[in-house]
Amino acid sequence: MASDEEIKVTGEFMPDPNMCRFQVNRPVLPDAAVVFNKGDETYSSPLADALFAIDGITRIKVADDQITLSKNVPAPWPELAKFILPAIREPLLSTQPPISAAAIEAAQLSPQADMAEAIEALLDQHINPALASHGGFVSLVKVENKDVYIEMGGGCQGCAASQMTMKNGVETAIREICPDVGDIIDVTDHAAGTNPYYR
């Protein structure tokens, strides 16, 4: 059992201001990834229960030594960190695992291959036909530890409205068919876009 002084947690801002990644100086969930959404079953996982007790936390992803959180309140992350850091440290000081075996088992019931197949079908059948009128498209790069990496091309690359398309359209649609996905990451080099629809 570690002392509180030995557990160090640092925060890292992400491109989405409603998300923040916290790095712990020890494995929290080695060689696995679990995603919790507010209101979902946490399977009595002390870490998830402690973090969801903080007002505004809507999503938790735990993978190895990283904890990525999403929020739906205007309070800045440094202000929320006053509550988040103790909520991370205390379960790690306990003799009980921070993430229950039942939560890990439930997470493993959604293979990444099935997730990738479902997302590709969504892009091909629904998203890309809608973007075709703008000369754009979205492609799946990979699914890794439940994180989804996608790339925008054609008229979507460098488009001023691409961030809104990603957040309100693509991301929402992916989360509807795959509620267990972790982060959805746009790896597009938008600076290299040569034919944006909006100028």
Image (cartoon, rainbow, N blue to C red):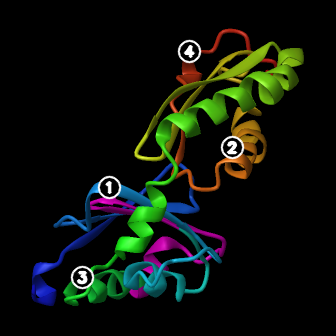
- Which circle marks residue 92 in the picture? 3
Which tag, 1 or 4, sits closer to the chain's start? Answer: 1
Say which amino acid is labelled 1: Ala
Q: Nearer the viewer, mark 3 or mark 4?
A: 3
What is the distance, in whole Å, between disc 1 and disc 3 at their CAs?
Answer: 17 Å
Reading the image, the residue beneath label 1 is 32
Task: Tell me if mark 1 has few (under 14), some (14-19) or many (20+) residues whose alpha carbon lies within 10 angstroms of its own.
Answer: some
Q: Residues within 10 Å of mark 2 (few under 14, many from 20)?
A: many
**Label whose residue precedes the other's in the sequence (1 or 3):** 1
Which quarter shows the C terminus? Answer: top right
- Say if the magenta span includes residue 63: yes
For badge 2, the amino acid type reads Ile
Determine whether label 1 and label 3 are within 8 Å by CB.
Answer: no
Q: Residue 174 has which mark?
A: 2
Q: Provide the secondary structure element on which disc 3 rests.
A: helix
Give x and y (percent) for residue 90: 28, 89
- Circle 2 — which element? helix
First in sequence: mark 4 or mark 2?
A: 2
Query: What stretch of residues is rendered in magenta?
Result: 60-83
Quick one: SS at disc 1? strand
Whole-number angstrom distance, CA of label 3 to CA of label 4: 44 Å
Q: Nearer the viewer, mark 1 or mark 4?
A: 1
Q: Earlier in the sequence, mark 1 or mark 2?
A: 1
Q: Which residue is mark 4?
A: 192
